Image: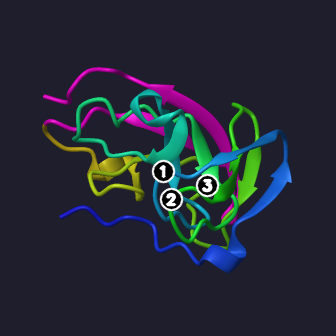
Amino acid sequence: MPSPLTITAANVTLVSGAQSTGVAATALTPGMPVYQDSSNSNRWTKCDADATGKDACTGVTLTTADAAGQPIVVATTAGTVIGFGAILTVAEGYFVGSTAGLINPTADITTNWKPCLIGWGITTSNMQLVLSASGVAHA
């Protein structure tokens, strides 16, 4: 059974790197893997590792959007460092989860997930973004 990170929204911070602003397609909280949905005016929405077309993460939310249509700030560049609080393992890879908007460690990847590496734990609190999608289902 996959065990996603338990993210406390108040602990999610931009440590260094780039961020951009946009519009949310749905309610979002800090620390969610997201992508821009081209079928919905490029609004930001939750990634999902086992849903076709929703597996390629292009950012991680830094702010809250309580509903669709609200502004959102997203870390969008590889090399950006995000603080998550002390919930990470150093050198662990973190991937888009099979539940929309969640992040899972490498060991949770299972059949039919399309792995998308969000980033690496570089300290027990900080993740450096990679944002690299495989585009293929895990066997």
CB contact under 8 Å: marks 3 and 1: no
**SS class of the residue under badge 1?**
loop
CB contact under 8 Å: marks 1 and 2: yes
User: Is residue 5 visible in this depiction of the protein?
Assistant: yes
Find residue 58 and report its horizontal and vertical position in percent: 56, 34
Pick the quarter of the image with the N terminus. bottom left
> Left or right of 127: which side holds 103?
left
Kindly report which numbered mark, 3 or 2, lies closer to the viewer in this rendering: 2
> Left or right of 96: which side holds 11?
right
Which amino acid is tagged 3? Val
User: Is residue 94 visible in this depiction of the protein?
Assistant: no
Report which residue position mark 1 lands on: 25
Q: Nearer the viewer, residue 56 or 116?
A: 56
Cα separation, mark 3 vs mark 1, equals 32 Å
> Left or right of 50: which side holds 95?
right
> Left or right of 59: which side holds 111?
left
Cα separation, mark 1 vs mark 2, equals 5 Å
**SS class of the residue under badge 3?**
loop
Q: Residue at (56%, 67%) from the top-left corner?
A: 29
Vertical relation: 73 (above or below) 22: below
**SS class of the residue under badge 2?**
loop
Segment colored magenta: 112-139
CB contact under 8 Å: marks 3 and 2: no
Crowding at dot 2, Cα within 10 Å, few <14 / some 14-19 / many 20+, comes out as: some
Q: Earlier in the sequence, mark 3 or mark 2?
A: 2
